[in-house]
């Protein structure tokens, strides 16, 4: 077995998206080859309703999949195919935009005004860029969880881990998406397939991710820290005094060219220009309601 070294530690940076939603972005809208097949990761945790209430009004997507994981509050959504619904605390929505969809996402805080969650974008391979759009909406009770002997708890959103498989399926990048909690002071090693790109995102507590025998040798990773791993088949984390909770995400690289502007991601500039021309002339949507 080979432990994955920490390639880089990134602090998520404040940004504003949608109609004035204040969030933190860990990566996206640059050279994301190291994260391939993933394109963007946003942390939209906020306790001030005025900083998120205007949400993400109607906007298009093509060529990607968006994964929304809610921790607190609700997100109301609707789309050009007539779908609508609400995802709440612990729920996941996996949207395959494919050939094109126009949708909106409107966050609503809980009783304390909290709106907490994450959105991850995954690229689609060239062969599936123009596939039919679809949703997978998974409620919290349907996401399996496993508690290990040392108290480590893992929720499995997507992929197979410790013998259990998450409810989201049919995803092009075959990702593994885990929500991991490690108790205070515990050192935990978790398997990650060698051929995948992988990252962790800390959102509670803190600790060290390291490939060395001395757990104190790694850089401390605290709230809103993203850890990009190098190659190997497992990662090791040493939880701090408050324990640590993080997302562990991995996927098979597509290794294809990326032509990207805003919410549309294609393989060539010509395809990108076609998509925006279709938006202007009303032929963007390929799947009727």
Image (tube, grey):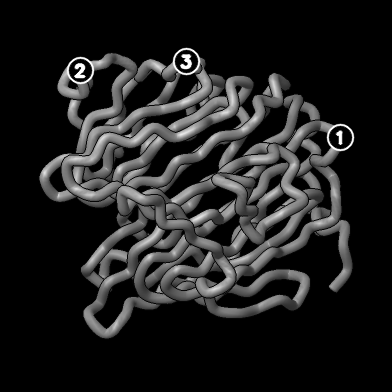
Residue at position x 18%, y 29% from top? 220
Image check: 30 left or right of 273? left
Mark 3 and mark 1 in contact (Cβ < 8 Å)? no
**Residue 240 spot, x, y in % from top left:** 15, 40
Decide if residue 279 is in sight here.
no
**Residue 197 sits in which quadrant?**
top right
Image check: 142 left or right of 56? right
> Does residue 77 lie above or below 211 as drawn?
below
- Label ID, residue 127: 1
Q: How much space separates mark 1 and mark 3, taking CA atoms?
A: 33 Å
Q: What element carries label 2?
A: loop
**Residue 2 spot, x, y in % from top left:** 47, 15
Residue placed under numbered mark 2 in the picture? 214
Decide if residue 247 is in sight here.
yes
Residue placed under numbered mark 3 in the picture? 2
Of callouts 3 and 2, which one flags the residue occurring earlier in the amino acid sequence?
3
């Amino acid at each position: 077995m080979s432990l994955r070294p920490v390639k880089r530690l990134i602090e998520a940076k404040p940004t504003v998206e949608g109609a004035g939603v204040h969030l933190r972005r860990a990566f996206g809208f640059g050279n994301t080859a190291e994260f391939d097949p993933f394109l963007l990761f946003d942390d939209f945790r906020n306790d001030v309703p005025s900083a998120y209430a205007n949400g993400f009004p109607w906007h298009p997507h093509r060529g990607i999949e968006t994964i929304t994981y809610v921790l607190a509050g609700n997100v109301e959504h609707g789309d050009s195919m007539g779908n609508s619904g609400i995802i709440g605390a612990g729920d996941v929505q996996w949207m395959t935009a494919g050939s094109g969809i126009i949708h909106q996402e409107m966050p609503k805080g809980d009783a304390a005004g909290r709106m907490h969650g994450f959105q991850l974008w995954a690229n689609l391979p060239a062969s599936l860029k123009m596939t039919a759009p679809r949703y997978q909406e998974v409620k919290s009770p349907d996401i399996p969880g496993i508690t290990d002997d040392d108290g480590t708890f893992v929720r499995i959103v997507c992929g197979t881990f410790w013998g259990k498989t998450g409810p989201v399926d049919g995803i092009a990048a075959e990702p593994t998406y885990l929500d991991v909690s490690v108790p205070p002071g515990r050192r935990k090693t978790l398997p990650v397939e060698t051929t995948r790109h992988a990252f962790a995102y800390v959102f509670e507590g803190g600790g060290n991710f390291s490939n060395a025998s001395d757990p104190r040798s790694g850089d401390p990773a605290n709230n809103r820290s993203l850890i990009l791993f190098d190659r190997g088949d497992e990662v090791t984390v040493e939880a701090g005094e408050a324990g640590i909770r993080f997302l562990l995400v991995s996927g098979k690289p597509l290794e294809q060219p990326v032509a990207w502007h805003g919410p549309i991601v294609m393989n060539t500039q010509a395809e990108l220009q076609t998509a925006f021309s279709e938006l202007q002339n009303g032929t963007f949507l390929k799947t009727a309601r």
